[in-house]
Amino acid sequence: MPNLNRVFLMGNLTRDPEIRYTPSGMAVASFGLAVNRKWRDKGSGEMREETTFVDVDVWGRQAELAGQYLAKGRPLFLEGRLKLDSWEDRATGQKRSKLKVVGENFQFLGTRDAGAAGGGGAPARPAGAAGARPARPAAPGKAPAGDAPEPPDGAEENFEASEDIPF
């Protein structure tokens, strides 16, 4: 039987992306995403809300874009896959694990102020971005193409043409 590991999330960043580089020079950005769920309690009829906090890693060009344009509070639509990390705690020797999302594609949804009513306000465009391609941060080395998961077909095109950049 075939397997499927696909996640779609929409929420707000809980912290600024932290950019690191692998020894081969591949960029990795880590950030948190808060995803809210609202529902009406059947017993009492009152509205309930819960927030799920998800740790996310994105790789390569996606990581560079996250580091350049994302910040705490910014709404984001993310597509990716689940990954379970397991390790042994050095201090206690106990086995530990953590489920996180490896982001493979994301879309900016606008500013937090514009999206306060639902996270999908009009996209904001930073000054000087019209017709300009975002600059790449300097990396310690050039990474081989096989170090990170490849984004889905056409995902890179969304960031190559300045007219398609949603900010």
Image (tube, rainbow, N blue to C red):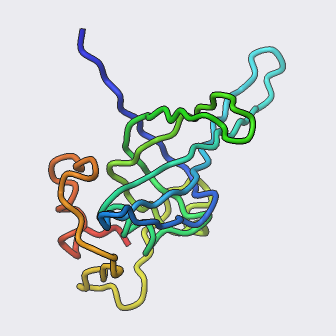
Image: 73 above or below 162:
above
The image quadrant that residue 53 belongs to is top right
**Count of marks placed on residues:** 0
Residue furthest to the top in view is 1
Vertical placement of residue 16 versus 127, above or below:
above
Report x, y in % for residue 142. Answer: 23, 71
The answer to whether residue 34 is above or below residue 97 is below
Q: Nearer the viewer, residue 69 or 127?
A: 69
> Which residue lies at the image location 36% right of the left edge and 64% below the top edge?
27
Relative depth, front residue between 77 and 7: 7
Q: Quadrant of the N terminus?
A: top left
The quadrant of the rendering that contains the C terminus is bottom left
Rendered location of residue 80, percent (x, y) = 37, 42
Name which residue lies at 31% across and 23% down: 4
Q: Is residue 2 left or right of residue 127?
A: left
Above or below, 137 relative to 23: below
Q: Nearer the viewer, residue 163 or 148?
A: 148
The residue located at (57%, 50%) in the rendering is 33
Give residue 139's position: percent from left, percent from top: 33, 76
Q: Quadrant of residue 59?
A: bottom left
Residue 95, image x, y percentages: 63, 28
Give the quadrant of residue 52.
Answer: top right
Residue, far right:
44
Which residue lies most toward the bottom here? 128
